[in-house]
Image (cartoon, helix red, strand yellow):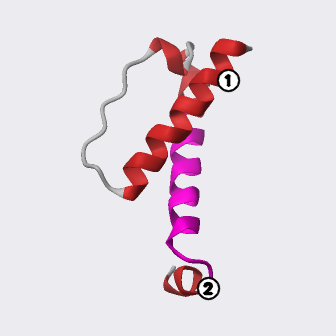
């Protein structure tokens, strides 16, 4: 991961982490039923990764509502 961060910067690590988190949530919802909009999410901390996850979940929620 250090090499990736050195070559591509921290933004790539944030994007990868947020994408994996969103995929995990969507996969869980596929098993349990429902959509992201049906749930309330609590985020602890204000770090760059947390902010990225919030933005990505909000974007996916808006896509689900408009679909």
Task: Give whichever of 60, 22 is nearer the camera.
Answer: 60
- Local packing at callout 2 (Cα closer than 10 Å; few below 14, some 14-19, many 20+) is few
Which residue corresponds to the image point at 59% horizontal and 32% vertical from the top-left? Answer: 59
Q: Quadrant of residue 63?
A: top right
| 23 falls in the magenta region | yes
Sequence-first disc among 1 and 2: 2
Say if 53 sits above or below 32 in the image: below
Secondary structure at badge 1 equals helix
Task: Give whichever of 32, 45 is nearer the camera.
Answer: 45
Q: Quadrant of residue 24?
A: top right
Residue 43 x, y percent position in the rendering: 31, 38
The range drawn in magenta is 7-25
Residue lying farthest right? 67
Left or right: 42 as drawn, with respect to 8: left
The numbered mark at residue 41 is: none
Which residue corresponds to the image point at 55% horizontal and 23% vertical from the top-left? Answer: 29
Say if 26 sits above or below 31 in the image: below
Q: Quadrant of residue 31?
A: top right
Which residue corresponds to the image point at 30% horizontal and 31% vertical from the top-left? Answer: 42
Which residue corresponds to the image point at 58% horizontal and 80% vertical from the top-left? Answer: 4
Residue 33 x, y percent position in the rendering: 57, 14
Tell me the residue that label 1 is attached to. 63
| 1 falls in the magenta region | no
The numbered mark at residue 7 is: 2
Secondary structure at badge 2 equals helix
| The C terminus sits in image quarter | top right
Say if 17 sits above or below 10 in the image: above
Residue 9 x, y percent position in the rendering: 55, 77
Say if 16 sits above or below 26 in the image: below
Residue 18 x, y percent position in the rendering: 52, 50
- Local packing at callout 1 (Cα closer than 10 Å; few below 14, some 14-19, many 20+) is few
């Amino acid at each position: 991961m250090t090499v990736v961060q050195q070559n591509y910067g921290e933004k790539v690590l944030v994007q990868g982490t947020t994408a994996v988190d969103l995929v995990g949530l969507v996969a869980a919802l596929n098993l349990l039923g429902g959509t992201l909009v049906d749930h309330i999410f609590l985020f602890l901390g204000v770090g760059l990764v947390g902010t990225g996850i919030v933005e990505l979940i909000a974007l996916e929620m808006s896509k689900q509502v408009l679909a």
